[in-house]
Image (spheres, rainbow, N blue to C red):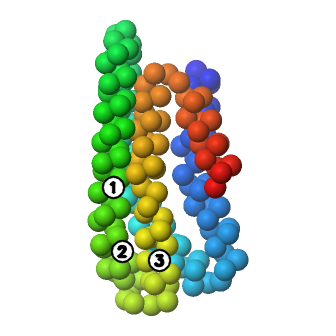
């Protein structure tokens, strides 16, 4: 049980840790960049959280098929979830590029230096959305196959690279 739960817990904790590292780095740049990160990070966090269905929906479908011994169909489910994640991720990039200004102004209370910093951060950070969603789908896929060690290795590798 712990061999499945331990790595899964670390993977779930990875996303907040990314933002914590960003906060530590940006905190050295001053108050306005840090305020921008807070606003942009909140918006991006909402989007990422709303896409958790990619992980949890995929886990259930793949686990059912895997448990029935239908390995090829479980593979197809994982591939389909990955394509959905990439397509949705590209759509999110396009939408947030269009709405970054108005959304950050809404949260910042107008066009302020913090809002401009948030908009800049969000426009850059959202470029990673397809990969974040692909990670969610892949994590769900691997959990459905009862392999939580592989996503852990990927997350640790991504942390080392960034």
Local packing at callout 3 (Cα closer than 10 Å; few below 14, some 14-19, many 20+) is some
Q: Is residue 15 toward the left or the right of residue 79 in the image?
A: right
Provide the residue designation for mark 3.
Answer: 120
- Closer to the chain start, of discs 3 and 2, is 2
Location of mark 1 (residue): 90
Quadrant holding the C terminus: bottom right
Task: Looking at this view, name the residue that lies furthest to the top.
Answer: 69
Helix, strand or loop status at disc 2: helix
**With 88 as the anchor, is 27 left or right in this view?**
right
Q: Nearer the viewer, residue 83 or 53?
A: 83
Tell me if residue 57 can be seen.
no
- Which quadrant, please, contains the N terminus? top right
Q: CA distance from mark 3 to mark 2?
A: 8 Å
Q: Dot 2, how many residues are within 10 Å of its Cα: few (below 14), some (14-19), or many (20+)? A: many
Determine which of the numbered discs, if any, sits on residue 129 in the image. none
| Residue drawn at x 53%, y 73% as measured from the top left | 37
- The answer to which image quadrant residue 110 occupies is bottom left
Residue 88 lies left or right of residue 143; in this view the side is left
> What is the C-alpha distance between the residues marked 2 and 1?
15 Å
Query: 48 above or below 139?
Result: below
Residue 153 found in image quarter: top right
């Amino acid at each position: 049980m712990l061999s499945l739960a331990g790595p899964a817990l670390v993977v779930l904790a990875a996303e907040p840790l990314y933002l914590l590292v960003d906060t530590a780095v940006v905190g050295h740049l001053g108050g306005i960049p840090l305020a921008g990160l807070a606003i942009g990070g909140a918006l991006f966090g909402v989007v990422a959280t709303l896409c958790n269905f990619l992980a949890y929906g995929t886990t259930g479908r793949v686990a059912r098929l895997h448990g029935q011994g239908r390995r090829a169909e479980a593979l197809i489910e994982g591939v389909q979830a990955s394509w959905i994640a990439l397509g949705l991720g590209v759509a999110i990039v396009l939408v947030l590029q269009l709405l970054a200004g108005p959304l950050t102004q809404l949260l910042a209370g107008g066009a302020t230096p913090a809002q401009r910093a948030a908009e800049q951060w969000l426009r850059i950070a959202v470029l990673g959305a397809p990969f974040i969603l692909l990670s969610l789908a892949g994590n769900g896929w691997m959990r459905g196959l009862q392999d939580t060690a592989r996503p852990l290795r990927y997350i640790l590798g991504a942390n080392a690279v960034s």
